[in-house]
């Protein structure tokens, strides 16, 4: 793996980037990976939409480019480009077009997706290509994240000529979640501006419609996903969401790289959101955090001496909320507390609220997106639950480990890769996992965790094992950089071969 400083120019494109706008782990990755790459020498820029409501109060200047021409459909419409800073070294450009991005949510309301997501994200992809020459940033490589940016690799491959600004630019496409694919009717295809031949089985055609994720998968030079286990799972029928065949066909260019955790933000020793700081060497502060959490969510202080379980999650099927709902009936039969922070599908919001109303002395539910409370839960809970149906990487289990909050997880995707079961004989392991997607299996794993809770010394050992684990970004960033370098090298070789062949052909004429 490369140890020397890189000089690559890399453009990241994502539909959400922390701290500017976030619905989940994608934003954490898009906000943190650039910083880790910058430490390794890369020159980075990021592009994301200008979501008016989310950028209020953020340091954003501009417009730095006015009326940037962006082709969409058969028209060319204007975007205003604003600029912010991830740190001193990394600029982030925001693509502003209020009809597309001035909304209450990023992708849709609790009732469903926005009707015009197709246009919204074609616009983002095409604006990205217009923006780079305008701000004079010529990337060696563009790294695109999830379906919202899936058309960028297709544009690079199909629309750039060999003398174009983009001719030498390689592309990487990262799948953060294969379930969200950006599928739209074929009648909208002309809006993309891509050649008609791309609406084919080899291109972005998918069951008669079009699929942005597939466009990224088939077009990018390199494909990655966010854990080694998930890179294998998505090639199977069970996890592939009907793209398993496509991914099998592309497996030579598919790599699994585990996400890192941002320990500048998630560190109990320095966290300013929590009631007291603490460390692996001195856990005293965690007790203060637990009391503070109980008071914050209005659960009885009696639970100070009982296990307090925590959940922070998007309320979506993926996260195993049906298992959680079934198991909650059993949890309320135990002498424990449960605090849940989440936002998402209406039916889960209703279900969880009803449970909390029936058992206010045991269950607290906060239907909100609240970063401060998320930190308080990581610090104040004893056990963290993640019964995901699938989990590409998962970040909360990594944060939980660092905060000494013992994870109980379903062994899938990144949860499989990061959580080793506690083995009492060896004194090793950091959590408790289960395999079958069944409430009984989940409940058994919770009971196993509860059975160790009162064995104070053993429990502290499990906590400390977890707190010693290190998922910092540096090692993941090095793996990305190695892939970038390979992709850029082979792209340059290919372009130079094409150019040589063309000039040979010209000489012959
Ligand atoms: P996913 O990206 O599938 O939602 P991850 O575990 O990868 O799941 O990342 C979730 C991120 O979003 C974590 O940083 C988590 O703390 C945060 N998060 C999720 N829901 C909430 C919420 N309701 N309030 C605050 N933070 C949340």
Image: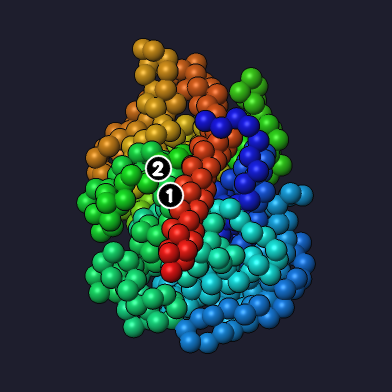
Point out the frontmost of discs 2 and 1: 1
Is residue 53 visible to the viewer in this orientation of the structure? no
Q: Are marks 2 and 1 in contact (CB under 8 Å)?
A: yes
**Along the line of sight, the residue nearer the viewer: 464 or 226:** 226
Label 2 – label 1 distance at C-alpha? 8 Å
Query: In the rendered image, which residue does mark 2 sit on?
Result: 255
Instruction: Please give the label number shown on residue 140.
Output: none
Is residue 237 visible to the viewer in this orientation of the structure? yes
Report the residue that reaches farthest toward the front: 508
Residue at (65% x, 56% y) in the render = 45
**Along the line of sight, the residue nearer the viewer: 151 or 389:** 151
How many marks overall?
A: 2
Residue at (37% x, 26% y) in the render = 421
Residue 355 at x, y = what percent? 40, 55
Residue 211 at x, y = what percent? 35, 68
Q: Quadrant of the C terminus?
A: bottom left
Left or right position of 177 against 260: left
**Quadrant housing residue 232:** top left
Element under disc 2? strand
Vertical position of residue 205 compared to residue 469: above or below: below
Left or right position of 504 against 102: left
**The CB of the residue at mark 1 lies under 8 Å from ligand 1:** no
Query: In the rendered image, which residue does mark 1 sit on?
Result: 222
Q: Residues within 10 Å of mark 1 (few under 14, many from 20)?
A: many
**Along the line of sight, the residue nearer the viewer: 159 or 14:** 159
Element under disc 1? strand
């Amino acid at each position: 793996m490369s140890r020397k400083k890189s000089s690559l120019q890399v453009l990241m494109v994502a539909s959400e980037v922390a701290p500017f706008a976030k619905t989940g782990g994608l934003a954490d990755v898009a906000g943190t990976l650039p910083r880790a790459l910058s430490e390794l020498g890369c020159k980075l820029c990021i592009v994301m939409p200008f979501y008016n409501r989310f950028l209020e109060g953020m340091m954003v200047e501009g417009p730095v480019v006015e009326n940037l021409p962006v082709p969409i459909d058969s028209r060319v419409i204007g975007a205003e480009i604003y600029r912010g800073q991830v740190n001193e070294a990394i600029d982030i450009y925001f693509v502003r077009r209020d009809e597309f991005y001035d909304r209450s949510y990023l992708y849709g309301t609790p009732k469903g997706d926005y009707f015009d997501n197709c246009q919204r994200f074609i616009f983002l992809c095409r604006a990205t290509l217009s923006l780079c020459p305008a701000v004079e940033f010529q990337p060696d490589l563009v790294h695109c994240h999830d379906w919202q940016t899936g058309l960028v690799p297709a544009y690079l491959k199909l629309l750039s000529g060999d003398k174009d600004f983009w001719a030498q630019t390689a592309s990487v496409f990262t799948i953060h979640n294969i379930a969200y694919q950006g599928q739209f009717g074929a009648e909208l295809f002309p809006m993309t501006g891509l050649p008609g031949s791309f609406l084919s089985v080899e291109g972005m055609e998918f069951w008669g419609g079009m699929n942005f994720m597939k466009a990224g998968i088939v077009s990018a030079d390199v494909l990655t996903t966010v854990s080694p286990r998930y890179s294998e799972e998505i090639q199977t029928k069970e996890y592939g969401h009907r793209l398993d065949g496509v991914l099998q066909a592309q497996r030579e260019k598919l790599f699994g790289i585990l996400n890192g955790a941002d320990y500048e933000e998630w560190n109990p020793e320095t966290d300013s959101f929590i009631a007291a700081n603490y460390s692996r060497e001195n856990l005293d502060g965690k007790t203060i955090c637990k009391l503070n959490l109980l008071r914050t969510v209005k659960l009885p202080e009696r639970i100070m001496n009982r296990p307090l379980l925590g959940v922070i999650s998007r309320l979506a099927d993926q996260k195993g909320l049906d298992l959680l709902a079934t198991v909650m009936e059993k949890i309320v039969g135990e002498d424990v507390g449960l605090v849940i922070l989440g936002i998402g599908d209406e039916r889960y919001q209703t279900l969880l609220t009803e449970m909390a109303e029936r058992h206010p002395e045991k269950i607290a539910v906060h239907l909100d997106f609240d970063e401060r409370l998320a930190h308080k839960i990581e610090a104040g809970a004893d056990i963290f639950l993640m019964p995901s149906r699938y989990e590409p990487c998962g970040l909360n289990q990594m944060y939980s480990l660092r905060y000494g909050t013992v994870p109980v997880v379903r062994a899938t995707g990144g949860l499989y890769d990061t959580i080793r079961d506690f083995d009492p004989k060896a004194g090793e392991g950091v959590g408790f996992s289960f395999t079958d997607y069944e409430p009984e299996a989940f409940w058994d794993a919770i009971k196993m965790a509860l059975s160790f809770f009162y064995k104070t010394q053993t429990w502290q050992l499990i906590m400390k094992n977890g707190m010693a684990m290190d998922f910092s970004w540096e090692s993941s960033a090095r793996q990305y950089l190695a892939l970038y370098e390979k992709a850029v090298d082979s792209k340059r070789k290919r372009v130079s071969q094409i150019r040589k062949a063309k000039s040979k052909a010209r000489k012959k004429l």
